[in-house]
Image (spheres, rainbow, N blue to C red):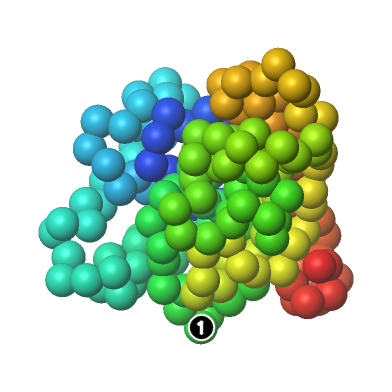
Amino acid sequence: MSHRIAIFVSGTGRHLENFVRLALGGELDAHVTLVLCDRAGAGAIERAQKYGLQPVTLLPADFEDGEAFSRAAFAAAAEAGAETVLLAGFLRLLHIPADWTGRVLNIHPSLLPAFGGKGYYGHHVHEAVLERGCTVSGCTVHYVDQEYDHGRILVQRTVPVLQVDTPDDLATRIFDEELIAFPEALRLHMQALRVGQGPEDTA
């Protein structure tokens, strides 16, 4: 039986589409049971619908605080039968319930721990990398804990930073690697679960 995943999104849903295509093509032994979006009108909603998925939209403003939002989000994942949650361009800090520890993965567009934490997302990351004069950057897939970009690392992939790069150039080069890294990390995670390991064993 294929692994059941929930994908939480805030933006365009390009990672979502990549996972769906890999699953449909038989390259990933998983299927999407839930797409959850925290922004009305996000492009990911239309992408999900294109593949017959009906996203759930949870707006943070409708909840008392971040913990209440997190409880609702993970309750939706549990109701959908998800075994693992993927944060694919999801920009909100979640409070991870104890029973979801080691079952939530995030992708970040830098080589963590560098350029991680609050405020480092999207082009803010790439601008900081260029301003610092780095010659290498990349992406990281990690387990999620209660801090931004802090959990144990599963996969990292690197790219060169060229002197002529703009933030857009760097973002494009890194995103190409993200499309490889995130599925690779999910496969490692699923393999660890099959043999009874936890995230500590796969880091």
Q: Is residue 17 above or below residue 186?
A: above
Residue visible at 38% across and 56% down in the picture: 92
The kind of residue on which mark 1 rests is Ala
| Extreme-bottom residue of the structure | 98
Check the picture and name the quadrant holding the C terminus.
bottom right
Residue visible at 76% across and 68% down in the picture: 193
| Residue under numbered circle 1 | 98
Looking at the picture, how far across and down is residue 41, in whole percent?
24, 31
Confirm whether residue 25 shows in the render. no
Q: Is residue 162 above or below residue 3?
A: above
Identify the element where label 1 is drawn: helix
Q: Is residue 139 above or below residue 22?
A: below
Is residue 192 found left or right of 19 in the rendered image?
A: right
Residue visible at 21% across and 52% down in the picture: 59
Looking at the picture, how far across and down is residue 71, in whole percent?
33, 72
**Quadrant location of residue 190?**
bottom right
Residue situated in front as seen by the camera: 117 or 65: 117
Confirm whether residue 166 shows in the render. yes
Residue situated in front as seen by the camera: 54 or 203: 203
**Quadrant location of residue 153?**
bottom right
Please tell me how crowded label 1 is: few (under 14), some (14-19), or many (20+) other residues with Cα within 10 Å: few
**Quadrant location of residue 50?**
top left
Is residue 58 found left or right of 70 in the rendered image?
A: left
Looking at the picture, how far across and down is residue 4, in whole percent?
59, 53
Residue visible at 57% across and 26% down in the picture: 167
Looking at the picture, how far across and down is residue 28, in whole percent?
74, 39
Q: How many marks?
A: 1
